Amino acid sequence: MSDFAIGESDFLLDGEPFRILSGALHYFRVHPDLWADRIAKARRMGLNTIETYVPWNAHSPRRGEFDTTGMLDLGRFLEQVAAAGLYAIVRPGPYICAEWDNGGLPAWLFQEPGVGVRRHEKRFLAAVERYLEDVLGIVRPLQVDQGGPVLLVQVENEYGAFGNDPEYLDAVAGMIRKAGITVPLVTVDQPTGPMLAAGGLDGVLRTGSFGSRSAERLATLREHQPTGPLMCMEFWDGWFDHWGGPHHTTSVEDAARELDALLAAGASVNIYMFHGGTNFGLTSGADDKGVFRPTVTSYDYDAPLDEAGRPTAKYDAFREVLSRYTDVPTEEVAVPSAAAPEFSVPLGEPVRLLTDPSAWGSPSWHAAMPTLDELGARLALFRTEIDRDGPVLLSIGEVRDRALVFLDGDPVGVLERDRRDRALMLPRGRGRLEIVVEDQGRVNYGPRIGEVKGLIGEIRLGAELLTDWSACSVDLDGVPTVWGRATVDGRAGIGPTAWRASFRVGKPVDHFVRTDAWGKGIAWVNGFCLGRYWHRGPQHTLYVPAPIIRAGDNELVVLELETLADPTVHFVSDLALGPVED
């Protein structure tokens, strides 16, 4: 057991000054069989600490649940950090941002009207307290003063950029202490006066988040915190990407220079990210600062380890900088001896959603169009019969986030939130109207956190309100097994269609699936959801971690929402994350 405290100018470990040299590594973005590899590479770069967020909505997808299996086994992750001889920082939120769906807040929180978002509101606080009891029950015995690795626990996350409710922050800090956390608490905010004031708490160490102008930012932080160690809790060494935008990178030389300046000033640091990993499944979030922009599946972040966990030039540069301030291990980092195999296999056995929706999920009937939240769905098919003189205008209050429109099974058009589409002309006013609605990721930053998904407001055909809808909430977890419930359809590729392919592997290694000849959809390997793809890019590969591949026969399933220009799976030797911004 060790004592960890905040001194007048330093962190103190057993009474001696201790500089935190940390790297962000999110357990929920990395396959658990690869955690030890990534942690070992952090130690070899010269880090002494691993930091992670905790995503409430991943652990608690439904009210009353708290899942810690597989990729959500926080206790196992922290134990592996300790086994590598490193310390840990835990940031449980409840809000984490992290470019993660809804900033980590469960969608079910907002199903009751008027529930507060990140403010002192009794129903919100009651749910937060239950969550913190669950997650900190894992962390409590793993604190450094209990013989574990955890040095610090964070209160909320960049709250000064969202609100100004000290009563709420104080309540969250009190819940953390009540749950048995005895190590020091911290807050983090961008180092501006208003944000540090609104996001900080007396008696809790303030830290900063920035990636440039280190000396200036630390000076601002010191103005608002005259004593205590200086720390950059998020040293941004890269950035994340949106669909349809460039792949963001930062200069290796500039990032290394800023890290050096930060350390030369005597500050502690958490490099965000050390290894970004992947937004597997449908976990990526979105921004909406006037325009809705969903985040891509890759969370490569241009970090020292790339999405597949391989050292980059930034790894070597940061290692050299760290060697000026700490003893860096001398052993070499293990890298793959050969590139991933390249081969192609055809996709076949198409199964169409529009042909037999009941094979994809449970149908329900509604007088008015339900939201995706009311259905508990991320993707749903809605149907109604229309009988009007046509052509006729279909109009919708608001689309969140994308709607594919069909008439008697034939595609009519697409309504997209980022283009603010709300209407399209139907070629005729009679027939079976079908709308496939997709949630592209919940906003993770700003005032639109917690918003409802689906088709919002009235749906009209001309001036008449459309009613009497059937709804099929697509069971996305069940897509890889839909062939056991539905039949192969000869009208392949019209509307959302599932395809599958088999491939054989000798020794399981990391693979990469090329996606730019596909339209828009989701892919699985052996039932594990790799995430979303979209021809818009910038990302044009999906990472397939070796632990989900079997020696021998394997299966890849694709749910294509638009059109496959090439119904073939191309396995390639490397990541293709898109053209780099200028």
Image (cartoon, helix red, strand yellow):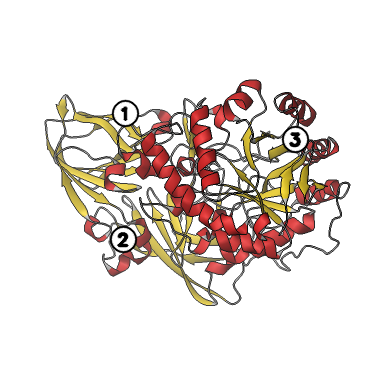
**Residue found farthest to the right:** 324
At label 2, counting other C-alpha atoms closer than 10 Å, the crowd grade (few under 14, some 14-19, many 20 or more) is many
The residue wearing badge 3 is 228
At label 3, counting other C-alpha atoms closer than 10 Å, the crowd grade (few under 14, some 14-19, many 20 or more) is some
Mark closest to the chain's N terminus, 2 or 3: 3
Determine the secondary structure under disc 2: strand
Whether pointer 3 and pointer 1 mark residues with C-beta atoms closer than 8 Å, the reply is no
Determine the secondary structure under disc 3: loop
Mark closest to the chain's N terminus, 2 or 1: 2
**Residue found farthest to the top:** 194
Mark closest to the chain's N terminus, 3 or 1: 3
Distance Cα–Cα, label 3 vs label 1: 53 Å
**Of the numbered discs in the image, which one, if any, rests on residue 351?**
2
Task: Tell me which amino acid carries mark 3.
Answer: Gly
Task: Tell me which amino acid carries mark 1.
Answer: Arg
Task: Give the quarter of the image for residue 343.
Answer: bottom right
The residue wearing badge 1 is 422
